[in-house]
Image: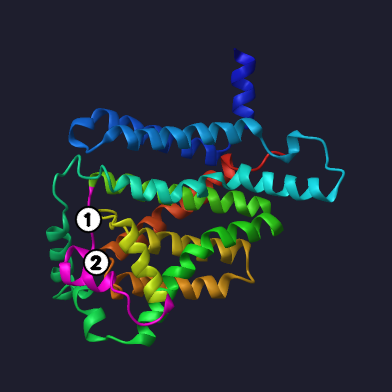
Amino acid sequence: MSGLAANLKNRLRLVDCMTIVFICFNILFIAFARDRIDQPLPIAAGYMACLVASLAVIAAGGPERYRPPRTKAMVIIRWFQGLVRQAYPLLFLSYFFLAVTRFDNAVFAENLDPWFAAMDRAIFGSVPASWLMVRYESCLLSELFHGAYVLYYLSIPALAFWLHAKDREGLAEYLDVMLLLFYAACITYVFLPVVGGRFDPAIRTLAEEYRFGPFTRIMAFIYRGTLHAGAAFPSTHATIGLVIALVARRRALPLAPFLAANAALILVATVYCGYHYVVDVLAAIAYVAVLYPLTIGLHGRYGALPR
């Protein structure tokens, strides 16, 4: 038994521990709050499937556990095996984000938007998400800011592929930092359900309307298709966009200017596109300011790849 435990300990990495703890937290929360959640069993089953898949990837291990490849085909297979072993949690992000919006009203039965909109009014005298897109209606601005959102979705796996090819230790650091911030945001959504600017029916209609160019239409399609609500504080897009820019500055300098520019656009786009209150963005910046250096330290101590 001790040999099995030691073997498991040698195989587990920081990203594995964070992912397993996050999944188990959500399963336990759903179990305790099941009477206040609509159809809790399918949601919990989804998390269980993610847990089983995680354990299967961990058990299979990376290329270092197998003989060196002798053919080009096996080199390619081992390359992708190494990528999956490190980056497998990225495959679950969409489920994690959408699933939490199905049980985030277990603590507070109603979304807390009136309170968060009031914070914006107290600070700025209004709710910018309710008028920016209307007052400054423009195909150019709409495509620019919605385009930043589309590129955000692409940049998450793109940076992973880049780092796996160029700097695998950098990939481990990227995943540790990004996932800890993502998991922290998702846990916050469980206790603070906030829809964001789309709480206003008029802004929701605009956000889901097919208009202007391809980027605006892609985002309208995404929001029409998912119909998620309640995962706005802090803004995940702002949080992860900043993390991507910071990691690129440390580990992928050729990509850093582009990713930093896109992160800056996202900070504005979250409000202009009607998805978030300004306080959601401020919270994202605060989360990154606190948790980014903390996780860099954790990675340095516990997240190094096996040699």
Q: Is residue 208 magenta?
A: yes
Which residues lie in the magenta part? Answer: 192-214
Please give the name of the residue rendered at 65% of the width and 61% of the height, measured from the top-left corner. Answer: 162
Q: Secondary structure at mark 1?
A: loop
Residue matched to label 2 = 277
What percent of the width, then of the height, locates residue 111?
17, 52
Is 34 positioned to the left or the right of 251 in the image? Answer: left
- Under tag 2, what secondary structure? loop
**Along the line of sight, which residue is nearer the eye, 202 or 68?**
202
Is 295 situated above or below 25?
below
Q: Is residue 98 above or below residue 30?
A: below
| x and y percentages locating residue 155 in the rendered image | 53, 64
Q: Is residue 100 highlighted in magenta?
A: no
Q: Position of residue 289 (x, y in %)?
A: 40, 59
Q: What number is the disc on residue 75?
A: none
Residue 194, numbered circle? 1
Task: Please say if the residues under marks 2 and 1 sit with CB atoms less than 8 Å apart.
Answer: yes
Residue drawn at (16%, 54%) of the image: 112
Amino acid of disc 2: Tyr
Q: Amino acid at mark 1?
A: Val
Marks 2 and 1, the one that precedes in the sequence: 1
